[in-house]
Amino acid sequence: MPRIGYRAHDFGSFDSASALGERIESIRASFIQLALNKVIPSAKPWQEWDEEYISQIAKDLNNHGVGVAIIGCYINPIHPDKEARKKEIERFGKSLSLASAFGCPYVGTETGTASPTGGYSIDTSSRENLDIFYASLSEMLELAEKYDAYVAIEAVSRNHSISSLERMTGVLSSFRTKRLKTIFDPVNLIPYTGIPEKDGVPLKVPSEEAEHKFISDVLDLYGDTLVAIHCKDYVLDEETGTKIGDLPALTGIFRWKEFAEELRRREIDVPWLLENHNPATVKETAETLEKF
C-alpha cells in the first residue's frame, strides 16, 4: 500500500509550524516535503537557522503527527552568476547541516537552469552547464558526507540540466557514493511531447506498454537510490501536443495504479508526496491512492 504524504506549501502559507501541523492533522496526519520559508514566510531566514530553532520546528510538527520526509531546498546549482551559485550551494549546505534537527536525512533539489530567474533557457543543456552541475554536485556531496546527510536530486525533462534518463545515468555512474539519492517525479521526467511508442511517436494517451517501459527503465536505474516519489498528473495539450504537467494526481492520464503495482512487485516502499493537490479534495485523493 503506498504511503501518501504532501508537499507542505500546497496547503498555502502559515504563521507557524504548529499552524501548519494543525492544518495537516485536520485533514489527515502524515509526512511532508518541507520548504520552510515557502510555507512559513515569517520563519527565520536560512542564514539564521540553528539546531535549536529547527528542532523546535520539527517538534511542533510532530505534535500534530506530521513528520518531514524530504527537506525541500530547491536551489539552482548551475546559476549563471558564480557568486549567486556559491550562495545557493551554501544555502543547501545549511539544510544538510541541520538534517538531524529536521528529523530527516534527505535534502532535495532539482538540477538547475541557465536562466537566472529559474525559467527555461536553451543554454541549460550545454556541455558547459553540465560540467558546472557536476562541480556543484561534488561540493554538495562533500557537505553531505561532512554532515551525515544525503543529497536527493530530481531530474526534469527539457527545463533542467539533468533532463533525461540518459543524463541521470551519467550522474549516477560518475558519483558512486551512498550520499547521492534520487527523487522520482514521473510527470516531470516524462518527455515534453509525451512518452514515445515503439516507433518513436507519442500518442495522446500512451499505451500501457510504452508507459510501463518508461517507468521500468527509470526504476532499473534508480534502484536503491530512490527515496521519494512526487505524485501529480498530466495531459498533452490538444493544440500543441506538449505536456501540461501540473495537475492533481488522478485527474490526468498517468496510470498511478499500475505504477503502484510495479513498485510493489519490486518491493520498493518509499513515501509518495502529493504535488499541486487541491486541499479541498486531497484527503480523498490520498485515500484513493492508498488503495492501490
Image (cartoon, rainbow, N blue to C red):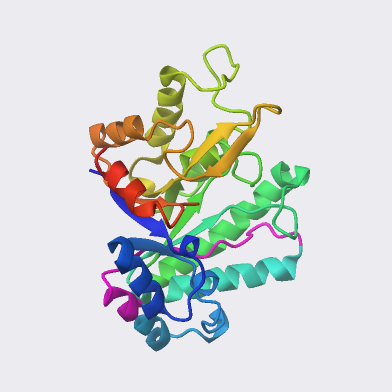
Residues 49 and 140: in front is 49
> Which residue is farthest top?
199
Pinpoint residue 68: horizontal percent, then vertical percent. Answer: 35, 66
Pinpoint residue 176: horizontal percent, then vertical percent. Answer: 43, 48
Q: Is residue 259 left or right of residue 206?
A: left
Q: Quadrant of residue 147?
A: bottom left
User: Residue at 35% across / 82% down in the picture?
Assistant: 55
User: Residue at 73% across / 71% down in the picture?
Assistant: 83
Pinpoint residue 291: horizontal percent, then vertical percent. Answer: 24, 40
User: Residue at 32% across / 62% down in the picture?
Assistant: 27
Could you tell me if residue 169 is visible in this image?
no
Q: Is residue 223 left or right of residue 254?
A: left
For the record, the magenta segment spans 58-80
User: Residue at 55% across / 77% down in the picture?
Assistant: 41
Q: Quadrant of residue 88?
A: bottom right
In the picture, which quadrant includes the N terminus? Answer: top left
